[in-house]
Amino acid sequence: MDNREWFKNAGYGMMAHWGLYSLLGGEWKGRRVLDYAEWIQSNMPIPNEEYSKLADIFNPIFFNADEWIKLAKESGMKYFVFTSKHHDGFAMFKTKVDLFNVVDATPFGRDVVAELGEACYKYGLKFGLYYSQELDWHHPHGGGYDNFAGCSGTSWDNNWDFPDRCKKDFSICFEEKIKPQVKEILTGYGDLCLIWFDVPHTITKEQSHELNALVKKYQPDCLINSRIGNGAYDYVSLGDNEYPSEFIPDNNSDANSLNGFKYSPYGLYETAGTMNSSWGYKYYDQNWITAEEIISRRKKLNDLGINYLLNVGPDGLGRIPSFCTEALKGAAVKSKK
């Protein structure tokens, strides 16, 4: 069974947003973010010099890859997608490209992506990786500087450390960091079922297709989601927490926007959803969905031929919140009745 056929039948997966931002839990110097906690560096905004200090204390002693993946397995999920690098530019894997990574910059010193990949192999789940291919607030030429629409922070790009947008050239970041790191995750962590790219704005059509070619060169069966931008994808990522009542793909849609990809050449679709109001850990957000809501949303999506990728946001110590665990296990039990 190739990955396209597998994905169409998978139905249900787990996503995990976890990184330095998890230490802050959505709060910085007495202020709380109003939206996504993983956007806190942009939301506040926090200079790289200060934000990088979080790496000095990142030591999640309770992180256990087996426990995470076992929870996904027991919840009935078929695949697991992890944030290998989010918009803050911090890699949760050992990379030769940038010392700003979990192995070289933290007292923890362990390759999180490697451990999760091994756990997925052990428990029989497919493994996928999220990678922010454009936004990188740690790099002076990170993208997003030509988009001024609303976002979860003060800016798509890092305009607090690097305010002169006229001097920014995304191709420098793309060549120096993005392409080499994508190659690293493709060649260093076994078979990937998918790469989950995100928020294409500045990236050019040529760059999106170059990334596509890179993925297919090293892992021909690895699926690529629509947020790579510019039509260079295998399957459609619907909008965040998008649960359509009906779904009629637009065969003519090739818009380069977050929700604009409404047609998949292979008939593959997915909605990524949160369990509260944030992807990353936000300690004061108690807007948890219930087991019944998980079952209802999953059925609604699956009946329309859309996979449900349900996110958890572990805390800074590596613990998946008990509210998530209880709801996921409860949904698994109730769906069998």
Image (spheres, grey):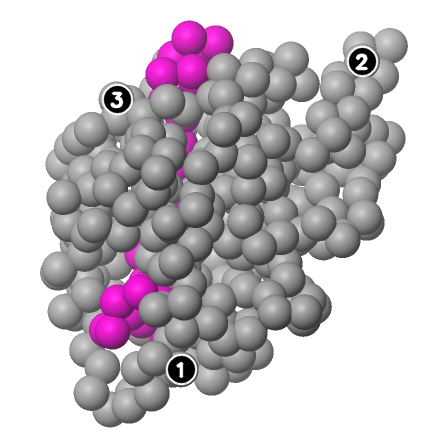
Mark 2 or 3, nearer chain start:
3
Mark 3 or 1, nearer chain start:
1
Q: Is residue 48 left or right of residue 290?
A: left
Q: Are marks 1 and 2 in contact (CB under 8 Å)?
A: no
Between the residue at mark 2 and the residue at mark 3, the CA separation in whole angstroms equals 32 Å
Q: Is residue 231 left or right of residue 216?
A: right
Residue 326: quarter of image: top right
Q: Residue under label 3, please give it.
A: 190
Q: Is residue 42 left or right of residue 158?
A: right
Mark 1 or 2, nearer chain start:
1
Residue type, numbered disc 2: Val
Range of the magenta residues? 117-145
Q: Are marks 2 and 3 in contact (CB under 8 Å)?
A: no
The disc placed on residue 333 is 2
Q: In the displayed structure, would residue 60 be above or below residue 151?
A: above
Q: Residue under label 1, please give it.
A: 160
Q: Residue at x 24, y 37 (%)?
A: 94
Image x and y of residue 197, in percent? 38, 50
The disc placed on residue 292 is none
